[in-house]
Image (tube, rainbow, N blue to C red):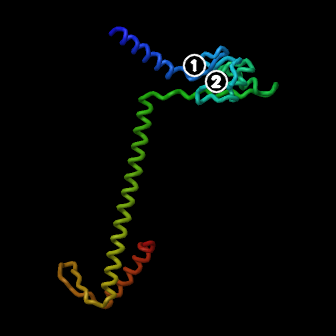
Amino acid sequence: MKTITLVLALSLAAGSAMAAGTPYQWRDASGHMVYSDQPPPREIRQSQILRRPKATTPGTAEQPLRESGIKPGDGGASAAAAPSGAPVATAKAPAARKTIAEREIESNKRRAAEAEARKKQDEAAILEQKKARACDDMRASLRTLESGARVKTVGENGVQRFVGDLERAQRVAELQRSIADDCAAQ
């Protein structure tokens, strides 16, 4: 039982190690399979390399660096590529990572801004609906007044009275002006 457990543990460890940290695979000069997280030596031909990381392809920046003797990440690549006497551009320092609190504050600000924008859109939509309703009411009143039907109105003292011809003409003119001014787009 101990033997089976030991074999399973070793096979799991070996499998996870190969999957996690061995992106290169090639056959050496004697024909043995080699797995490594480092690139193969120079004497290994491209045809012998069976697998390489996706980010590195043959002929990219790794090969010129290897040939020039400059190590990746030491900043010498820009100095080697620049002609002599030319100013060397220095790389910008990477931006400092934000703390969780800073990211949370930014997230809260974004959410507040989005909520404010939604609130303004909702208010604008409600205002448009009210304006459309008012225009519809004015048009309905205008149609009623222009139809020639007798119209009753309630006076200031609460007494009902009929609208006369002069008052009708004044209301029609006022409604036409209001509709022209406020409801032209609808």
Quarter of the image where one finds residue 153: bottom left
* Place of residue 81 in the rendered image (x, y in percent of width and height, measured from the top left): 76, 27
User: Left or right: where does residue 29 sit relative to residue 87?
Assistant: left
* Place of residue 113 in the rendered image (x, y in percent of width and height, measured from the top left): 42, 45
* Place of residue 138 in the rendered image (x, y in percent of width and height, measured from the top left): 34, 77
* Place of residue 136 in the rendered image (x, y in percent of width and height, measured from the top left): 34, 75
Residue at left offset 41%, top offset 47%: 114
Neighbor class of circle 2 (other Cα within 10 Å; few <14, some 14-19, many 20+) is some
Q: Amino acid at mark 1?
A: Asp
> Disc number at residue 49?
2
Residue located farthest toward the right when viewing the structure as drawn: 85
Question: In what element is the residue under mark 2?
Answer: strand
Residue located beneath label 1 in the image: 37
Q: Amino acid at mark 2?
A: Ile
For the residue pair 92 and 151, the one nearer the viewer reads as: 92
Q: Is residue 175 above or below residue 150?
A: above
Q: Which of label 1 and label 2 is nearer to you?
A: 2
Q: Is residue 56 above or below residue 168?
A: above
Neighbor class of circle 1 (other Cα within 10 Å; few <14, some 14-19, many 20+) is some
Q: Earlier in the sequence, mark 1 or mark 2?
A: 1
Question: In what element is the residue under mark 1?
Answer: loop
Residue at left offset 34%, top offset 87%: 146
Residue at left offset 52%, top offset 20%: 21
Residue at left offset 59%, top offset 22%: 24
